[in-house]
Amino acid sequence: MRRMIAVLGTMMLFGCTPVPQPTPPPSTSTTAPQPSTSAPVSSSPTATPELATVYQLPADRDSAEWGTPVASMVGKKLSVARLNLSREGWRVDLMGAYRLASDRILVEFRLNADNAIRSDLKVWGDPEFDEWFHASDEAGGGFSSAFWEFSDVRLSVAGDDLSYRPVRTATNHCLCTMSNSHVRGFGDFPAYVVLTAPANATSVSLALRDVGSFEDVAVSPAVPQRSVVPLGYGYQLRLQSWTRPTPGKVAARVSVEAPAAGLAGSPFRQRRYDQLGAAPWLKLTDYTMAYQLLLALDSSGTYGGWPDAGGCQSCAEAKPVRAGQAVDFEVTLPDPGGSGLMAAPTVGWPLTAVPVEPDAPRSEQAVWYQGRKVTTGATIKDGQIDLDSAVLFAVDKATLTTTANSVLDRTAKTLQDQEKRTVRVVGHTDSTGSTAHNLDLSKRRAQAVREALTKRLGAGWTFMVEGSGESQPRIKESGLSGAELDRARALNRRVEVSFS
């Protein structure tokens, strides 16, 4: 039934996405950010927007430029048949990699599906975080339509056994291109993703499944300064100004433009504004004829402001522009703080050339994008390490296996590399077996991990050990079957190690 709803929602409301509310990050402070357990911020009532004026583009208005690719590859035949997400025929141009902060970089691509076997942007989603994952994600509010991310990119560095992944919110949404578009026959299309990366890396490798690996990619020390970027379909987006109308809010004044001559490589196709991307904060009923597919980011790409769910809160509405026309919108967003803001469209590359004054603290409604690193048996996030029970323990056992040693060695090293010395270990199971048995098993597994870490870390550490059994699933198992149920159960069998 959920699949039928998703397909019907996508067919009827092409270009729209549903609404998980973001988890608010911690307050602005000098301490390291920690995940928040606060309730989602409710949306304010939708205001009736005014009608914006569509105008002719001035003859001297500059056009967005793609630039010169660093390297190019073409998608290959499908390697994982069960995914049914072939990238065969896609052209992938790597446009650049740019340092945002010590733990993350921005990577930009130009895609082209004119010769692709399958041309929807769903093929670029990370299979670990596809729309079915989100549909079962209770913390994310649940989805009832497809949600497509450009997120299946893996970063690695020579001599490092970690695989670095896209940064994500607590509700598992990446900082990356988000779109429900089918782009065959419409030329070049921009895409970006912010990836976790080691601080000292000046050269990285970027792997894309069924495409290949871009090797020895130089990481530029700064993001390009620009105020206009391509959106695809012959459109471009221009950032005109930032203002701070009220405390905790920042307003971006933008222009959606359709140059009469089009953009190189992207023929013009008239689109509604909600079809120039997609976003997790929009509801299926959001049909405001306004552009609101924008994030406000701090200069490090660590915190970002999502628009309120439930319609266009501050921007004006307008009819779609024709070739040679433009329209201006203002989008009010939670303030990520600072003065070096970036405007990140959900399609198109981040815009960085326009400053905002004065400096301001971060809004409580801004969301935190956590770094993620993966090694065998462990996913390492900011403030937390998720250990795979299947690697640590045999089925229904709480005795550590010999293969657990390398995972626990990596966990101990990660703990030693940070300043906190209080560690919380929580065991979790799937829903198979009785509630009492699962609770006992999860406690014994957490205790086994605690004892192993104590031996590796030595004195000076404080441990808190808990077992949650099946009560806190990462993915809800009810309503799932077959491969989806197996996957959910595997994700739910884990031991979480957090530090504070």
Image (cartoon, rainbow, N blue to C red):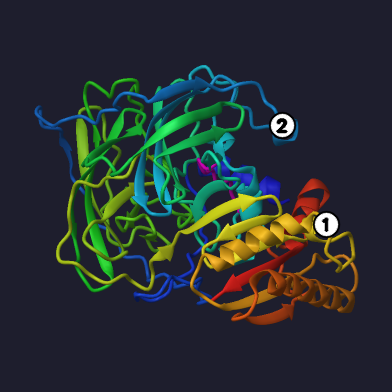
Q: What residue is at 45 percent from the left and 31 percent from the top? A: 216
Q: Nearer the viewer, residue 372 or 489?
A: 372
The amino acid at mark 2 is Val
- The image shows residue 64 at horizontal and vertical percentages of 24, 31
Residue depth check, mark 1 versus mark 2: number of the one nearer the observer: 1
Q: Is residue 89 left or right of residue 66?
A: right
First in sequence: mark 1 vs mark 2 = 2
State yes or no: discs 1 and 2 in contact (Cβ < 8 Å). Answer: no
Q: In the rendered image, which quarter is residue 476 located in?
A: bottom right
Q: In the rendered image, which quarter is residue 33 located in?
A: bottom left
The amino acid at mark 1 is Thr
Q: Nearer the viewer, residue 450 or 81?
A: 450
Q: Is residue 459 left or right of residue 296?
A: right
Q: Is residue 4 left or right of residue 47?
A: right
Residue 80 — which label? 2
Q: How many marks?
A: 2
Residue furthest front as drawn = 458
Q: Nearer the viewer, residue 126 or 413?
A: 413
436 to 227, vertically: above or below: below
Magenta residues?
144-151
Q: Magenta span has 148?
A: yes
Q: Is residue 186 visible?
A: no
Q: Label 1, on which residue? A: 402
Q: Is residue 422 visible?
A: yes
Where disc 2 sits, the SS reads: loop
Where disc 1 sits, the SS reads: loop
